[in-house]
Amino acid sequence: MEFFFLCGLTLFTLFVFFSLFSIVSYACRTNASQPNLPPGKTGLPYIGESLEFLSTGRNGHPEKFIYDRMAKFSSQVFRTSILGEATAVFCGAAGNKFLFSNETKLVTAWWPNSVNKIFPSSTQTSSKEESKKMRKLLPNFLKPEALQRYVGMMDTIAQRHFESSWEGQQEVSVFPLAKNYTFWVASKVFLSIEDPKHVAKLGDPFNVLASGIISIPIDLPGTPFNRAIKASNLIRKELSAIIKQRKIDLAEKKASPTQDILSHMLLTSDENGQYMNELDIADKILGLLIGGHDTASAAITFIVKYLAELPEIYQKVQSEQMEIAKSKAPGELLNWDDIQKMKYSWNVACEVMRLAPPLQGAFREALNEFIYSGFTIPKGWKLYWSANSTHRNPECFPEPEKFDPSRFEGNGPAPYTFVPFGGGPRMCPGKEYARLEILVFMHNIVKRFNWEKLLPDENIIVDPMPMPAKGLPVRLLPQTTA
C-alpha cells in the first residue's frame, strides 16, 4: 500500500512540476516575443475589466477607472481588457496627439462587436469602410457654409419645442426634453421630418438603443445589448418605410435632391457607379440620428445644470443673449451672424463639455506593432483614448474642478487637451452642427426662463453618455432681466 501511495505522490509531484514548468516556459516565450508591454492588468477571462470600466461610469465617476490606473501603472499608457479585447489606454495630451496624428498610419478606427451587430450592413464590409463612406458624404451638409441655412430652422424648432413642452409648466425634467429637441432637429436636417408625432415615433426607441451600443455583447433577453438590437430593428423598419416613400417622391418631383442627407444618399453613386441599398442607407441614417442628437442632448442638459448652480454665469449668458434678442424684429429668426455673437455662451458650453464630456472617449486598432513611450503595442491590440485623462488633469487645466469659461478665451486650451469632439482626421464631422443647436437652445431658454434644481445633490451616471440619474428636474421661475 505504501508503495502505491509513494508512486502516486511521486507522479503527482512530477505532474505539478511539469505543469509549473510549462506555465513558466509559456510566460517566458510570451515575454520574449512581447518583451515590454505597457503595465497594467487584464482582469477576468473574456470579461476583462469591462464591468469596472462600465460601472465607474454608471456610478458617476468615469474618470476613476482611468486615473486609478494612471496612478498605479503609468500616466502615459497602461494595458487592460475592455469588452473582450486586449486594450492599451493612451493618456494625456501626448497620447491624444499620437492617436489623432497617426490615423491610417499606425492606427485605424475600431468599434466593439456590439456596434457591428447592431448595424448589420457594416458587417458586409467593415465598420471602417462604412465610416470612410460616411465621411465622404457628410462634408457638403455639415461644413459651416452649408449649416448657415439651418440656423433659422433650428430656431423655429426650438420655439415650437419651448411653446409645447416648457411654457405653462411649473416643473420640467430637462434631460428627456433636451433629447426631444435635438432629435427633432436631427429628424428635420437628415430626413425632413418635423411633425412632432412622427418624430416621437422614431425617437422613443432611441434611448434604449443608445444605452446598449457600448455594452458587453451578450445577446440574452433583458441585457442592454439585447434591448438595443430590438430597438434598432424597430427604428430600421420605420426608416425603411421613409426611404421607400422618398424614392417615390423624388421620382415624382415631390422631393428635392438637395433637401437633406437622405435625398443625397439615394442619388449619389460610388466610384463604380453603384448606389447604396436601402439597408445601408437605413443604417447610416440610424447612425447619424444617434450621433446627431445623443451627445448634444447631454451637453444641453449639463448646460442647464451648471447655469442653475452658477447664477453669475447665467446672468452673463442671459445678458449676451438678450442683446441679440433686442436686435431682432418681431418674429425674426436667428441667423448666422447672431450665432457668431454668442462668444461667451459658447465658452460656457465648452467649459460644461470639459467637465461633463458627452463623448467619453473612443477606440482605435493597431495596424502594426509599434513602440509608444518605451512600450510595445502589438498589432491588433485595441487602443482607447479618454477625454477625462486631460479634461480633469491639473497639468492641462489648472484647478480642474473649477468652472471657468475664461479658459476658452483667446487661443483657448493647449492642443490635444480639450477633446469633446475627438481630434485629427476623425474629429466629429458634426462639431459645427452641434454648436449651432446648442447655442440656439441656450438663446431660447434664457430668453424665456430662469430656473432652479429640484434635486440639489442629484447623481450623475454615464451610460454611455453622461446623464442626471433622475433626468434633472427643475422649477421654472419668472424671467428676470440681466
Image (cartoon, helix red, strand yellow):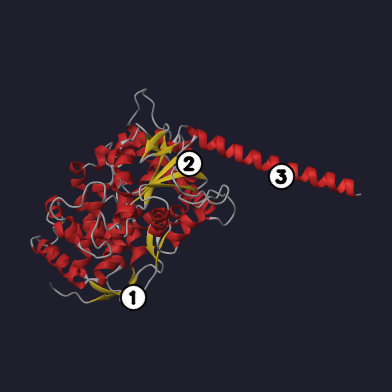
How far separated are the C-alphas under marks 3 and 1? Answer: 60 Å
| Label 1 CA crowd tier, 10 Å (few <14, some 14–19, many 20+) | few
Which residue is drawn at the image coordinates 65% and 38% (left, top)?
22
Q: From where the camera sits, is residue 254 visible?
A: no
Q: Nearer the viewer, mark 1 or mark 2?
A: 1
Q: Secondary structure at mark 2?
A: helix
Residue 314 occupies quadrant: bottom left
**Which residue position holds label 1?**
456
Q: Nearer the viewer, residue 407 or 194?
A: 407
How far separated are the C-alphas under marks 1 and 2? Answer: 40 Å
**Which residue position holds label 3?**
16
Q: Nearer the viewer, residue 371 or 436?
A: 371
Quadrant (top left, top right, bottom left, bottom right) of the C terminus = bottom left
Task: Return the residue found at the far right.
Answer: 1
- Looking at numbered disc 1 in the image, what kind of residue is underneath it? Pro
Q: Position of residue 50 (x, y in %)?
A: 50, 52
Q: Nearer the viewer, mark 2 or mark 3?
A: 3
Q: Earlier in the sequence, mark 3 or mark 1?
A: 3
Q: Secondary structure at mark 3?
A: helix
Residue 387 position (above or below residue 373): below
**Which residue position holds label 2?**
116
Q: Earlier in the sequence, mark 1 or mark 2?
A: 2
| Label 3 CA crowd tier, 10 Å (few <14, some 14–19, many 20+) | few
- Looking at numbered disc 2 in the image, what kind of residue is underneath it? Asn
